[in-house]
C-alpha cells in the first residue's frame, strides 16, 4: 500500500494556490503570464529538491524524471497543467500536477521500487484561453501541431507563444517530442461535472472524453449613426450575431442528448453607444461524444449564421480553429486504475468527461487514462470551483496505487 502524505499535499496545494490567487479564492494564472512564470519556478524548484532530472522543451512543457530500476524500460508519464482560466478555479489542472508530485515524493520517502522511469509533466497552455487552441503543449508533443505553428500562435494583443515563452524564460531547448516510447500516461483531474457527487462515488475511472470543435465567426455589417439612420436601411452586425447566439443555444437540444453548445467570446466593433455595430467576432464551442454529431453541429451552426446574415444583409466568415475527435482511453490503464481504486478501498464508477484534457492527445502516442475526483455542484471554470479534501485524499491514494502498478 502506498501511503501518501496528505498534509504535505494540502500544504503544497495551498502554496501553489497563492500564486495567482483571486480575491474570491479562485485562480487567475493565464498561460505564459508572469504568474505562470512564478508557478513554473516553484514547480522546477520542487522537482530539483526531489532530485529529479528537469528538462524544459521548446514549447515550455516542463518534465522531471525519476529513474527506475531498469533505465531502458519505457517510462510512465504523469501530470496535468498549471495554467488556469481567467478568474478560474484552483483545482482544474493544478490538482493533477500536485497529486503527481506528491506521488513521487511518497515513492521517494517510502523507497518504493519501480522498474520503469517515471516522468512528471506540466503541459503548456492546456486551457486555450490566452492562446488557442487548448491542449497546446500536449498536442505539440504528440505531433498533432507542429512546433513552429504552436510558437506562432498569438494572444489578443498579438504576442506570440514564442515571445511569451522567451519573456518568462521558459523557451527550453529540449525537442518537443517523446525521446523514447512511453509506456503509459496517467492524469488525475477534477470531474468538472455533477455525476460523481450525485452518485456518491469517490472517483471516476474515465472511459473517454467528448469530441469538440471550436469556430470563430466574424459578421460584418455597416457602421452608421444611431440617430439619423432609418431602421430599414441598417446592416447591424450585432443583431445578426445575437440571432446566432440564440440559435446556437437552441441547437443543443435539437440534435442529441449529450450535445453541448456555447458562445464564450464576443467582441463588438466599434462598441460605441451611438454607432450601429459594424463587426462582431465570436466563438462557438460544440461538443458531443459522437464525432458525427459534432460534424453535423458545425454544419448547422453555419446554416444559422447564413440565415441570420441574410435576414440582416450582413456578410460573414467562419473559421474552424480546432477540431478534436472523441477520445477512448486505453483499457489497460482503465483496468489498472480500477485495481488502484480497489487497493485504496474506495468506491468508483466508469465515467465519460465533457472537458478537454492533455490525456486526449497523449492517447495518440501511448496508453492513456484519467482518474476524476468529484467536483462540488459540478462547478468549474469559476472561482467557486471546489473539491472536498477528503475526496482529494481518496483520489490521491487511488492515483498513487495506479501509478505504482503502471511503473511496476
Ligand atoms: C479545456 O478546459 C476545455 O475543455 O476546453
Ligand atoms: Mn484542466
Ligand atoms: Mn479547464
Image (tube, rainbow, N blue to C red):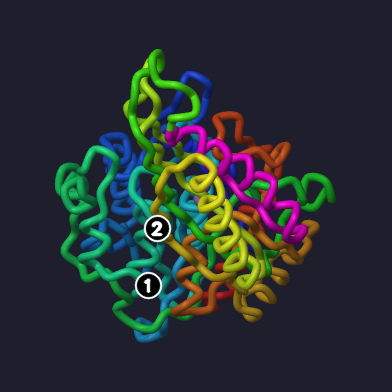
Q: Residue at x 45, y 24 (%)?
A: 22
Where the C terminus falls, by quadrant?
bottom right
| Residue 277 in sight | yes
Position above or below: 197 against 213: above
Q: How far across and down, in percent of the image, does residue 131 sit?
A: 33, 48
- Residue projecting furthest to the right: 199
Q: Mark 1 or 2, which is nearer the eye?
A: 2
Does any atom of ligand 1 lie closer than 8 Å to the CB of label 2? no
Q: Residue at x 73, y 62 (%)?
A: 351
Q: Which residue is mark 1?
A: 144
Q: Is residue 239 magenta?
A: yes
Q: How far across and down, in percent of the image, does residue 356 sit?
A: 53, 58
Which stretch is magenta?
235-263
Helix, strand or loop status at disc 1: loop
Q: How far across and down, in percent of the image, does residue 27 sit?
A: 46, 32
Where the N terminus falls, by quadrant?
bottom right
Which quarter of the figure has residue 227? top left
Q: Give the label on residue 319, or none.
A: 2
Amino acid at each position: 500500500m502506498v501511503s501518501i502524505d496528505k498534509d504535505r499535499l494540502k500544504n503544497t496545494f495551498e502554496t501553489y494556490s497563492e500564486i495567482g490567487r483571486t480575491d474570491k479564492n479562485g485562480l487567475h494564472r493565464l498561460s505564459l503570464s508572469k504568474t505562470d512564470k512564478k508557478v513554473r519556478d516553484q514547480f522546477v524548484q520542487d522537482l530539483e529538491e526531489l532530485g529529479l532530472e528537469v528538462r524544459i522543451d521548446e514549447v515550455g512543457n516542463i518534465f522531471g524524471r525519476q529513474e527506475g530500476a531498469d533505465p531502458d524500460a519505457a517510462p510512465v508519464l504523469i501530470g496535468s497543467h498549471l495554467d488556469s482560466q481567467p478568474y478560474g478555479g484552483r483545482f482544474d489542472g493544478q490538482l493533477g500536477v500536485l497529486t503527481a508530485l506528491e506521488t513521487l515524493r511518497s515513492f521517494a520517502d517510502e523507497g518504493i521500487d519501480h522498474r520503469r522511469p517515471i516522468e512528471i509533466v506540466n503541459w503548456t497552455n492546456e486551457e486555450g484561453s490566452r492562446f488557442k487552441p487548448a491542449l497546446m503543449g500536449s498536442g505539440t508533443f504528440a505531433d498533432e501541431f507542429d512546433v513552429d505553428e504552436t510558437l506562432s500562435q498569438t494572444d489578443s494583443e498579438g504576442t506570440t507563444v514564442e515571445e511569451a515563452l522567451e519573456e518568462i524564460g521558459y523557451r527550453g531547448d529540449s525537442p518537443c517530442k517523446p525521446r523514447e516510447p512511453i509506456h503509459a500516461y496517467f492524469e488525475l483531474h477534477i470531474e468538472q461535472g455533477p455525476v460523481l457527487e450525485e452518485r456518491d462515488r469517490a472517483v471516476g475511472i474515465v472511459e473517454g472524453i467528448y469530441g469538440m470543435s471550436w469556430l470563430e465567426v466574424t459578421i460584418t455589417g455597416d457602421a452608421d449613426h444611431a440617430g439619423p439612420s432609418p431602421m430599414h436601411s441598417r446592416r447591424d452586425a450585432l443583431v445578426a450575431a445575437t440571432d446566432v447566439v440564440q440559435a446556437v443555444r437552441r441547437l443543443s437540444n435539437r440534435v442529441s442528448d449529450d450535445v453541448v453548445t456555447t458562445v464564450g467570446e464576443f467582441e463588438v466593433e466599434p462598441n460605441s453607444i451611438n454607432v450601429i455595430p459594424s463587426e462582431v467576432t465570436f466563438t462557438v464551442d460544440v461538443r458531443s461524444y459522437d464525432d458525427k454529431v459534432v460534424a453535423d453541429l458545425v454544419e448547422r451552426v453555419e446554416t444559422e449564421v447564413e440565415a441570420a446574415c441574410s435576414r440582416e444583409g450582413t456578410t460573414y466568415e467562419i473559421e474552424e480553429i480546432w477540431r478534436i475527435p472523441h477520445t477512448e482511453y486505453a483499457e489497460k490503464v482503465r483496468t489498472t486504475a480500477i485495481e488502484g481504486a480497489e487497493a485504496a478501498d474506495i468506491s468508483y464508477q466508469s465515467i465519460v468527461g465533457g472537458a478537454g484534457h492533455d490525456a486526449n492527445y497523449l492517447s495518440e502516442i501511448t496508453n492513456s487514462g484519467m482518474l476524476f475526483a468529484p467536483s462540488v455542484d459540478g462547478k468549474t471554470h469559476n472561482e467557486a470551483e471546489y473539491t472536498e479534501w477528503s475526496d482529494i485524499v481518496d483520489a490521491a491514494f487511488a492515483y498513487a496505487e495506479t501509478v505504482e502498478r503502471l511503473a511496476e
